[in-house]
Image (tube, rainbow, N blue to C red):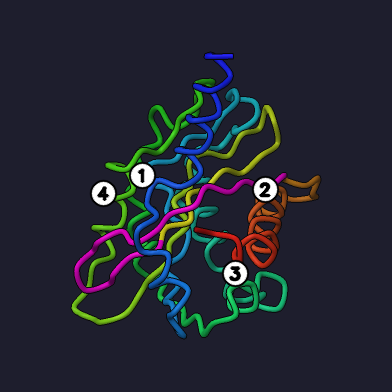
Amino acid sequence: MKKLIIISLIALLSTNLFSQGISKVKEATEIAWYGLDFTQAKLIGGSEDFADVEAIVNRHFESWNVIIITETKKYDIAKSLGKSVPSRISHAVEINKKVATEGLVTYDQNKLLKADLEKIVAQYQEGKDGLGMVFAVENLDKINSIVRVQIVFFDIRTGKVEYSNYMEGKSKKGITFRNVWAGGIHKIIKSIKKEYPNWN
C-alpha cells in the first residue's frame, strides 16, 4: 500500500510541476507559441532506431516545428486551447540547432524537473507582455513508440513559469522518419482540447 501511494504521488508530481498560474493561462485570450524545445530531450532507443543523429538535430528538429505552422488545420493548437496563438518558433529553431549529438541517443529514460523547465523557459524571455507556451520535449521513445513533453506556459517578460502539464502521444507508423514522430505531436495537440478544461 505504501509503495502504491508513493508511485501515485510521483505520477501526480510529474503531471503538473507548476500549478499556481493556471488561472492566468485560462484567463488569457492570446498565448504565443514558441515551438518544440529539444534542448533537454533524449532519444530513447539504439543507434539503429536513430541512425542519423546529425540529421535529427540539423533538419528534423526544425521540420517538426515548421510542420505545426504550415499544417495548422491538422496541428491546430489555437483550436485546442480556444485562444489566439501567434507563432514565434524562430527562437526554438535556432536554439535547437545547438543541441549536442553526443549522448542524445540513450536507453535511459529522462524526466524533466522544475529546474529543467525554468532553464528552458529562460531562453525565451523577451521584453514583451503576455504569456508564451513551449513544448519542452522530454523524449522520443522508440522502444514504446511515445513522444513525451511538458507543456509549459510562461510569462514572456519575466521568464517565470506559470504552469506546466505532462502529456504524451503515441507515435504512428509512417513512410518518413519525420511523420512517425510528428504523429505523436499531433496526438498531443488533439488531446489538449479534451484535457485542457480539467487542468488545475
Along the polypeptide, which appears first: circle 2 or circle 3?
3
Between 196 and 52, the one lying in front of the other is: 196
| Residue annotated with mark 4 | 119
Foreground label between 2 and 3? 2
Between 42 and 97, the one lying in front of the other is: 42
Kindly identify the residue that appears in the image at 67 percent across and 27 percent down.
143
| Residue annotated with mark 1 | 99
Residue positioned most to the front? 1
Q: Is residue 173 magenta?
A: no
Image disc number at residue 68: 3
| Residue annotated with mark 2 | 169
Q: Secondary structure at mark 3?
A: helix
Along the polypeptide, which appears first: circle 1 or circle 3?
3
Q: Residues within 10 Å of mark 3 (few under 14, many from 20)?
A: many
Q: CA distance from mark 1 to mark 3?
A: 21 Å
Give the x, y percent position of residue 51: 60, 32
Q: Secondary structure at mark 4?
A: helix
